[in-house]
């Protein structure tokens, strides 16, 4: 999708109850230090996604124009229900929106939430997986964790970091991981906001990005780490918060990281426009898209909720939807069809084997059965008398 008027600064998928995936894009009025005219305000736009062609519609379904006093859009967090968005702006604070409608008739409405508007410039925003909590990380290093939608404060820590770089909630919404521009990373308990751990790192390591595993069986935290002049993906065990290994996947500095909703794939976007997707089970790259955003920092990267498709954005190239070249997933009905096919094949094979085998139970019946004595002599003499059926035995 071409950037058009304004510059695409972020993109995110929206899951809807009717199982129709939408895309929300944020557009800024500035680009490369230049200001657009007043006729090109910052925009929040909703687009439809075509599953058959894996593409975004050319015209938005809904649009919201921000006032000049709001500044430009910076980042977004979409609630798991797809009904609520929270966006940060350059003029400080956050704005909240509600999405109303169904099919192709949608409306974006701004919500008046003064508690969010007083936050100041925010770098990171995130909703917990269960949607019950909201977290924001400020440019000034201030961390806030709130209950949603009541906005009751769980944690208000002004000195959580020097300045925020990234954050993510765990699958069970119990932990929040956050990283700082100085390369440090911390873990927080979301129930009461208490600090749990600081991830260990060597003097030449900077932990930049973080994402929790999402498959429900492997309790890991993935971190994009700059180790000297090498970029690696480190894996931490969340039961002990100790590093259990690392792998060179992208092999260049990463600007963004994402994990698919089913937890099977991990994606990394580079600062010069490449993306790689790795299968978590083997930690091996299964898809490369080189020069996808030619020479431009990838600002957002997200997996589609229902297909092996990723949405990426950059300031220069706008929003791009990429279909992944990874092994196709088995649908539930396909598994049942396969099992039924195996059962029928086994039944047919057994029947053919039974019909052509010399089975004990396959003896002739009725008139076709030859006449023979039911008791055959066991020891040699066939002239045995009825009184002595076995006859004389020579010992």
Image (cartoon, rainbow, N blue to C red):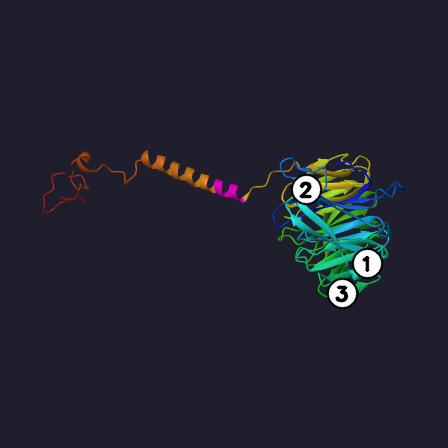
Instruction: Return the disc, 1 or 2, that comes first in the chain's sequence.
Output: 2
Q: Is residue 251 left or right of residue 340?
A: right
SS for tag 1? helix
Check if residue 110 falls in the magenta segment. Answer: no
Residue 48 circle label: 2
Badge 1 is on which residue? 117
Q: Residue at x 77, y 60 (%)?
A: 113
What residue appears at the point 62 percent right and 36 percent down from the top-left corner?
Answer: 52
Q: Is residue 357 left or right of residue 251?
A: left
**Relative depth, front residue between 42 and 313:** 42
Across and down, in percent, residue 49 comes to 67, 40
Residue drawn at point x = 77 percent, y = 64 percent: 155
Q: Nearer the viewer, mark 2 or mark 3?
A: 2
Front residue (pair 394, 295): 295
Image quadrant occupied by the N terminus: top right
Q: Quadrant of residue 281?
A: top right
| Marks 3 and 1 in Cβ contact (< 8 Å) | no
Residue 263 placement (x, y as % from top left): 65, 48
Q: What is the distance, in whole Å, between disc 2 and disc 3 at their CAs?
A: 35 Å
- Which quadrant, please, contains the C terminus? top left
Whether residue 80 is situated above or below residue 32 in the rendered picture: below
What is the spatial separation of the Cα atoms under label 3 and label 1, in whole angstroms?
Answer: 15 Å
User: How far apart are the alpha carbons under marks 1 and 2?
Assistant: 29 Å
**Residue denoted by label 3:** 153
Q: Earlier in the sequence, mark 3 or mark 1?
A: 1
Between residues 303 and 391, which one lies in front from this camera angle?
A: 303
């Amino acid at each position: 999708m071409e950037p058009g008027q304004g510059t695409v600064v972020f993109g995110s998928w929206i899951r809807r109850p009717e199982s129709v995936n939408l895309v929300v894009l944020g557009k800024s009025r500035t680009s490369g230090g230049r200001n657009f005219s007043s006729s090109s305000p910052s925009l929040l736009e909703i687009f439809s996604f075509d599953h058959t062609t894996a593409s975004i519609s050319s015209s938005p379904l809904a649009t919201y124009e921000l006032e000049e006093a709001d500044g430009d859009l910076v980042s977004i967090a979409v609630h798991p229900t797809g009904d609520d968005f929270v966006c940060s702006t350059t003029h400080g604070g956050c704005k909240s929106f509600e999405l109303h409608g169904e099919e192709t008739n949608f409306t974006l409405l701004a919500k008046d939430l003064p508690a969010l508007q007083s936050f100041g410039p925010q770098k990171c925003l995130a909703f917990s997986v269960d949607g019950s909590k909201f977290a924001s990380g400020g440019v000034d290093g201030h961390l806030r964790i709130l209950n949603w939608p009541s906005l009751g404060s769980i944690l208000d820590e002004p000195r959580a970091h020097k300045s925020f770089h990234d954050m993510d909630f765990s699958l069970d919404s119990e932990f929040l991981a956050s990283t700082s521009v100085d390369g440090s990373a911390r873990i927080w308990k979301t129930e009461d906001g208490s600090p749990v751990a600081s991830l260990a790192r060597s003097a030449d390591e900077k932990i930049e990005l973080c994402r929790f595993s999402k498959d429900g069986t492997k309790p890991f935290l993935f971190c994009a780490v700059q180790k000297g002049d090498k970029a690696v993906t480190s894996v931490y065990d969340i039961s002990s918060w100790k590093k259990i290994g690392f792998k060179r996947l992208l092999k260049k500095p990463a600007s963004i990281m994402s994990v698919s909703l089913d937890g099977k794939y991990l994606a990394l976007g580079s600062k010069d426009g490449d993306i790689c997707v790795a299968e978590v089970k083997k930690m091996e790259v299964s898809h490369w898209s080189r020069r996808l955003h030619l020479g431009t920092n990838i600002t957002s990267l997200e997996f589609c909720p229902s297909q092996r498709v990723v949405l990426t954005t950059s300031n220069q190239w706008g929003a791009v939807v990429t279909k992944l070249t990874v092994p196709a997933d088995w649908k539930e009905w396909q598994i049942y069809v396969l099992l039924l096919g195996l059962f029928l094949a086994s039944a047919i094979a057994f029947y053919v084997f039974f019909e052509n085998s010399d089975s004990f139970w396959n003896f002739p019946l009725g008139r076709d059965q030859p006449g023979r004595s039911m008791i055959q002599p066991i020891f040699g003499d066939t002239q045995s008398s009825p009184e002595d059926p076995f006859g004389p035995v020579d010992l």
